Image: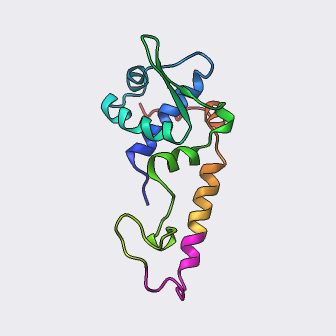
Amino acid sequence: MRLSARVEYGVRAMLVLALHYQEGPISAKEIARREGISFQFLEQIFPDLRRAGLIESVRGVKGGYMLSRPPQEVNVGDIVRAVEGPIVPMSCLHEDGGHKGSRACSRSQGCQTKQVWERLRDRINEVLDGVSLSDLMEWEPAQLLS
């Protein structure tokens, strides 16, 4: 299982906003520049974050984006679900039995392996929900290889 670039960039952009919390809005262009992210790609992620209530946008010359809640109240799981939807490692765990056009699993009721997929989903959510933006702000950056 691999998370998408949308998730990576969404988390990185949200961390920039957290690092500058209460300093006013930051433009998407500035966030893209700081993080080396395509501005156009970032602009596709921000509406999802706004719909999830994680960020607010401010119009005008000094406009941009800012967190709608303090960094300690936003966890990585919130961001992942905002840009990707529910975390489901197997389609049988999606609430409607399938997702994105897949059919419900015919074995769902008597499946002997479903429990392992449920445990995986629960642990992934537990880890992602256990890390807030303020936690990320305190962590040391990974050392770049020289």
Rendered residue at 46%/11% (across/down): 62
- Chief SS of the magenta region: loop
Rendered residue at 43%/37% (across/down): 47
Assess whether residue 104 is covered by the magenta stretch: no
Q: Is 30 rendered above or below residue 80?
A: above
Q: Is residue 12 left or right of residue 32?
A: right
Residue 143 visible: no
* Image coords of residue 139 (percent x, y): 63, 34
- The quarter of the rendered structure image containing the N terminus is bottom left
* Image coords of residue 82 (percent x, y): 50, 46
- The quarter of the rendered structure image containing the C terminus is top left
Assess whether residue 113 is covered by the magenta stretch: yes
| Viewer-side residue, 114 vs 97 | 97
| Viewer-side residue, 125 vs 101 | 101
Residue 34 visible: yes
Residue placed furthest toward the bottom: 110
Q: Specify start and end residues of the magenta stretch as a single range.
A: 105-118
Q: Is residue 73 left or right of residue 67?
A: right
| Viewer-side residue, 123 vs 81 | 81
